[in-house]
Amino acid sequence: MSGIPVIDLGECRNCEVCIATSPKIFQRNINGDYVEVVDLPKYPKYLVNEAIKNCPLDCISWET
């Protein structure tokens, strides 16, 4: 899959596994309230897929 990674903020519990796994793609928003996807021209599939695989609540997916 490819496209843009998205986080279902309704399901996300801010465990930060995605940030630990792929810090170039995921970060805390400026206020520290939630995790967000960094705006990049292209997202490395292997890093996003690693975050998807390790997310304990399955709240990361690809949007095409």
Image: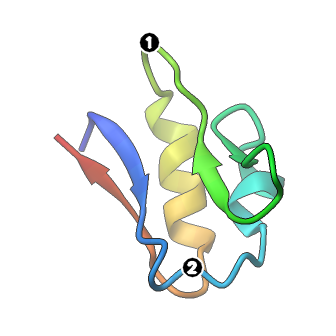
Disc 2 target residue = 12
Residue 60: quarter of image: bottom left
Q: Give the number of marks.
A: 2
Q: Which x, y percent locates residue 15?
A: 77, 78
Residue at the image point whose x is 81% and y is 52% from the top: 31
Q: Where the N terminus falls, by quadrant? A: top left
Left or right of 4: which side holds 27? right
Left or right of 6: which side holds 12? right
- Relative to 1, residue 44 above or below: above
**Amino acid found under the numbered disc labelled 2:** Cys
Disc 1 target residue = 41
Residue 17: quarter of image: bottom right
Q: How is the image coloured?
A: rainbow
- Relative to 18, residue 27 above or below: above
Q: Which x, y percent locates residue 10?
A: 45, 82
- Relative to 10, residue 64 above or below: above
> Secondary structure beneath disc 1?
loop
Q: Where the C terminus falls, by quadrant? A: top left
Residue at the image point whose x is 50% and y is 63% from the top: 52
In-front residue for pair 19/28 = 28
Residue at the image point whose x is 44% and y is 35% from the top: 45
In-front residue for pair 19/12 = 12
